[in-house]
Amino acid sequence: MPQLFSMAKSHSVTADFRLLDAFWREPVERTVLANGVTLIVKRDASAALASVQVWVKTGSVHESAHLGAGLSHFLEHMLFKGTERRAGREISATVQAHGGYINAYTTFDRTVYYIDLPSEHTGVAVDLLADAVLHSTLPAEEVVKEKDVILREIAMTRDDPDNRLWETVFATAFREHPYRQPIIGHRDVFSAVAREDLVAYYRSRYVPNNLVVVVVGDVDPAAIRPLVEEHFGRAPRVRLAPVLVPAEPAQLAPRSEHRFEEVELTRAVLSWPIPGLAHEDAPLLDLLAMVLGSGDSSVLWQEIREQAGLVHSIDASAWNPGTTGLFCVSFTCDAAKREAAEAAVRRTLQRCATRGFTAGQLAKAVRQLVVSEINSRKTMSGQASRLGVAEVVVGDLDHSRTFFAQLSRATPAGVRRVLQRYLSPERLTSVSLNPAAAATQAARAATASAAPADFTVERLPNGARLLLQPDRRLPNLHLRLLMQGGPLFEPAGKRGATALLATMLTKDTRTRSAAGVAQFIEEVGGSFFPFSGNNSLGLAAEVLPPDVDRALAVIADAALKPAFKAATFAQERDAQVAGLRQDDDDVVTLARKRLRAKFFGPHPLALDAQGDLAGVGALTAADLAALHRRLCVGANVVLAVVGDFDPRQLAPKLRRFLARIPTRTDAPAVPAAPAAKSLPAERGDFVERLPREQAVVLQGFPGPAVNDPDFYVSEVVDELFSGMASRLFERVREDKGLAYFVRSGRVVGLDTGMFYFISGTQPGREGEVLAEIDAEIARVQAGKVEAAELTRCQTRLKAARRQSLQTNSARAMQAGLNVLQGQPVNDWRNYDARVDAVTIADLAAFASRRLTRQQRTQLVVRP
């Protein structure tokens, strides 16, 4: 078997590795300043953007005597609250004014602060981040307010079943290592933290010789070093004491923890301890995870989900960022099937340990890892993150090359060896979160480069549209087939049909089984997936350029030869039902759905594309076949292709496919929806109670449809009410500490829409949050928005649009939607001018016309 894989490597796998050679040849400059700051710079002139990131080599495992207090996460929140030179609000306002996006995150071993913005403002980002990281004042009054905000965040994590599951996994699998402590901290331990503790931790860990600055984008490396020297280099090197991180003792026996709570669906994780990233077996463990549980053609997906029907979803991963880690198999299932599913996973692992793997399985996994490496470099922020991980987590900027060199020597025997060595029964930790109603059943069971050109558009005789945008900056190719669809096109009582139709189109065809489709595309590292929304549905395939024929084949078969097999239909319908039940476990998602239902009433947009339990449960395979015949017609189909291809060679193949789509003189008309002009359906103030720790407040108002004249005004209004620099955020979270989040949002349909506000707050303070929302609406209605506010919003929206169109998939989606919705294919080029045309008077008119108490649906969801 090793010889078989060696033969394969001499052809396709070796070619895969050659695709990465260009990345490894790209110059990356690494410099250590005199005070110990490490600077990494990479130039990428493909877009006028830059990502500036500061990686602080400290995380929750480094909190020593304060383990479990969440000091690292607390500091992440506090660093934008003010410095010796700037007030807190000035930081976010400055970023927004320069079209940037600022954020931060904390992990076990690092805290990262970053700004993504137009590259001409790179110096602003360097200045701001240096000021925040090295010169924060941690104001006492802000510490008090932010402490209350984080307590709300902790409550929110307790409301999230997935967070509770993974906290339990880490607390059970690790007995001594600080990984067993939640990054955010335990509520009681965090509550006892004083400002002095925070300041002491900040002064000991946020020092120059513990910082890595990464800059990637359209920059001159020669100009970046003096810039970083100016802002980071003046701080003196200081003593940096090593932090003792206790090693995890060897696990000698299996462990388990099964909890029963108020959830709808069982979530389970099987984990085994594995060595860290620097260990020689780490690449083989990554390969093992890919083979076992990455994609619909993986071993576990096929055997446990498709064949046995025991789970709704299943995957595998190897997580080992430090000196130790976990190999995990996670799945969701009905409560009654958990033990059978776990037993089936164990049997599959035992069979693989006995029989091993094929050369083809390893070749597919290697291709998937190559594709993942390419995909990580699509954006400036992604490239900067890759460099940060290599420097801070691995300690070697050349890690990617070394990793793939190790992969090139991998054999089926080697992957089988690591499975046998690490995934042994005595090292297993089994954790699950189950519906409370299943507790009795469980007890019984226990006993039993340059910017891309414009799109070209071609209309075929049958009405289908073909959109092409060649872009050879990256060896990546994206094909996206779009159709108008969504709730407006679904039969009454059978909502969720278009989402299920999209899923089914990626499954069985008259040419291949669902497993065959997954294998056919995934064995070359490709992906094939559905999408659906309020107004559209479709399919997308993404591959390396040599595999374009496979991508076209799976899309063509899906559109022209869907099989709608009964067994697959039943399984996917159950999975969609499980997803709806899982949504009900999240209080924010559930509250948003409740608002939507009250606001839209009988209008189809009362439900999102996933539908509801009754509607999805009523669907049949015949319903989907009929909907497919209705929607998949020439005038309703758009195919967008973006990436590394030659139009002269590919376009004829695409035309031949599109010509086979049934002809119809016009696209399906948008059905007349009830009461579209008399929304909201239920006006007034409503309160609903749910067994949760957090309260959620919402307000819904009539919003614009896709092509309404004030759509772009709503873009600016949404930005005005959202984000860290908004007045609403400042009042609700920063000044009063009333909520962890507050923002606005939109539901946009073809004939109508909803503009809404949402905030998560402490029970008992809902009225205060709602009063602040009302006050902010009144301010906008009165025309009291400041010119600087409007300019910041416009700058941020334009920069966000530029950032959102970096990937081939995003541009294909945007162009396809433009054409489907009757807009010019390259209408994105008009975005900046339309946003800039919005005035303060337009904002006031929008708020006065739409955001009125008489047209409001207000909902409070509380314990």
Image (cartoon, grey):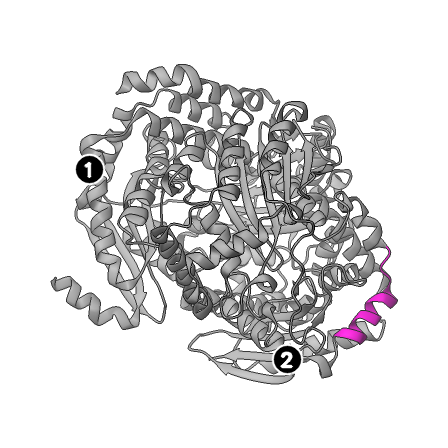
At 60% from the left and 56% from the top, the residue drawn is 485
Q: Verify whether residue 845 appears in magenta.
A: yes
In the rendered image, which residue does mark 2 sit on? 681
For mark 1, what is the residue?
351
Depth check: 834 or 656 in front? Answer: 656
Residue 364 got which mark? none
Secondary element at image label 2: loop
Image coordinates for residue 712, horizontal then vertical, percent: 78, 59
Left or right relative to 733: residue 7: left
Which quadrant of the figure has residue 216?
top right
The magenta stretch spans residue 548: no
Q: How crowded is mark 2: few (under 14 residues within 10 Å), some or many (20 or more)?
A: many
Which secondary structure dominates the residues rendered in magenta? Answer: helix
- Lateral position of residue 259 relative to residue 227, left or right: left
Q: Which amino acid does label 2 sit on?
A: Ala
Asked if the residues shown at circle 1 and circle 2 are in contact, with their CB atoms under 8 angstroms apart, the answer is no
Decide which of tag 1 and tag 2 comes sooner along the chain.
1
Which quarter shows the N terminus?
top left
Q: How far apart are marks 1 and 2 (CA)?
A: 57 Å
Q: Position of residue 758 (x, y in %)?
A: 61, 70
Q: What residue type is labelled 1?
A: Arg
Which segment did they paint magenta? Answer: 837-850
User: How many numbered tags mark residues here?
Assistant: 2
Q: Nearer the viewer, mark 1 or mark 2?
A: 2
Q: Residue at x 82, y 67 (%)?
A: 843
Above or below: residue 293 compared with residue 354: below
